[in-house]
Image (spheres, helix red, strand yellow):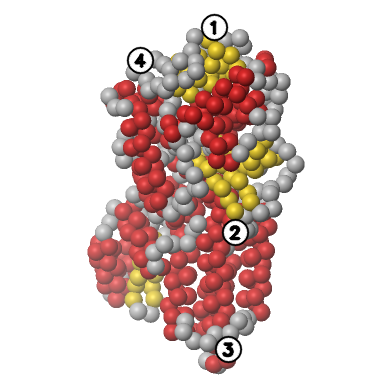
Amino acid sequence: MSAASPPTISATSATLVSTSLSTSSTVNGLCYLVPGQVVMLMGCDVIFAFLNLSRYLQHLGYEVNYVRNFTDVDDKIIRRANELGEDPLSLSSRFSKEFLDDMAALQCLPPTHEPRVSDHMTQIKDMIAQIIHNGCAYVIDGDVYFSVDNFPDYGRLSGRKLEDNRAGGRVAVDSRKKNPADFALWKSAKPGEPSWESPWGPGRPGWHIECSAMSTHYLSPAFDIHGGGMDLIFPHHENEIAQSCAACQESNVSYWMHNGFVTENNEKMSKSLGNFFTIREISKLYHPLALRIFLMGTHYRSPVNHSSEMLEIASERVFYIYQTLHDCEVVLSPFREGNLKDRVTPDTQKCINKFRTDFQTSMADDLHTSEVLTSLLEPLKTINTVLNSLKKQKQQLQQQLLIQSLVALEKEVKFILNILGLLASSSYSELLQQLKDKALGRAGLTEDQVLQQIEERTLARNEKDWGKSDQIRKALSLKGIGLMDVPEGTIWRPCLPNQQ
């Protein structure tokens, strides 16, 4: 996270805004997709980066005002709507709803505000008028352009110089502009496009102005945190700074937060390359919590390389977490109503203290969620150690101490999972079954087929046909189905597919 001013956040209230879910993130990308294929994985990274930050700030006691805006009016949406013969605002509204459905399925808490461009034309036009009044914009034939030459600090975020900017790529070519790098604040109306009345004639806003107007409206000209994908540093965020400061000298963002890209085979995911996946495609094969852990397994500023192997590892981690908590719950259920004390074993207290310290250190160090996930393994391992000790312990006082240790460990793990948004909304047993169902789907098997294979393996073992027994186990393991022999018989659970 980079600071644009001294590193301070208000003591009692943190105002937080994530930027445009428009280009590399969500809503603007929707217009390239068909119904049922809404939020792309490459947009999930920015969403979860800000959700993790918002949750952590709330944990620290801040009152978070989190604004996530919808771009529902822009060139690409209009183009796609015209291709489909649909009203652009109707198309945007439909896919915005689909986006919110996907967020709910991923157990994402809603932001404080979710403004849409089409609902804030008054604020946008007012800001443009102020920029013109302050001498930083000019009008040509109903179009309004920001004059970069009249804003000396242009480039302060990206470090780019004006002479480095070329018209054509992400800056529209227009011979009428005073400087090729000047960008549109207002675009005059054209046939087949939605438009609104303005002092400069009918038209619609340019891409950048919307975020400045809405963040100012909901947060004030100066607020704490702003960000999005790294590809938004220039020109989007650079232009936001210019127009916001041109409209109001007090405009300031204390911290800029930019996340890395999601890649496929180390190549950036993009709609143009066609190498992207939607949340719904992934959720058919993997539990939403596995997707969350997959994204949190890499620091938010680093590229997240998508692969089925990494999703398998994330899914395996979710199963381990909740199998451990389920085993703990089963053992603790007879004691829930009892008068348990706070005493725990020294090893348990040491484990809890270290876990809490590691969590605080990792999150305070620029949200290192990957390190938190690694440190989470230690209390889970300790729970399993205590469970095994409890089976062997006959002395009542020692049993009670172990029970109290389990309660404390379970409480601590759930506390951290809740902060991270990883606490399941269903019961442990329901979640484990959901994970098993997903594993069966990936394996192309039904549970009856797996149970039949277990029966055949049991028969082979009884007949001392160890070769066939191992063959069945290995064949299932290749498909991500692991067999475990326990005193009661053989059970199965998801496992990492054996590639050998």
Give yes or no for contact between labels 3 and 1 (Cβ–Cβ under 8 Å): no
The residue type indicated by label 3 comes to Gln
Q: Secondary structure at mark 2?
A: helix
Q: Secondary structure at mark 4?
A: loop
Extreme residue toward the right, this view: 6
Query: How far apart are the alpha carbons under marks 4 and 2?
Result: 50 Å
Seen at 65% across and 38% down, the residue is: 222
Please tell me how crowded label 3 is: few (under 14), some (14-19), or many (20+) other residues with Cα within 10 Å.
some
The residue type indicated by label 1 comes to Ser
Disc 3 designates what residue? 398
Seen at 38% across and 80% down, the residue is: 487
Foreground of the two, 197 or 460: 197
**Residue 246 visible in the current orientation:** yes
Residue 113: where, in percent of width, then height?
49, 44
Disc 2 designates what residue? 59
Residue 370: where, in percent of width, then height?
58, 53
User: Eyeballing the image, is 95 above or below 108?
Assistant: above
Q: In the rendered structure, which disc, 4 or 1, sits on the residue that comes first in sequence?
A: 1
User: Eyeballing the image, is 261 above or below 48?
Assistant: above
Disc 1 designates what residue? 175
Disc 4 designates what residue? 191
Q: In the rendered structure, which disc, 2 or 1, sits on the residue that comes first in sequence?
A: 2
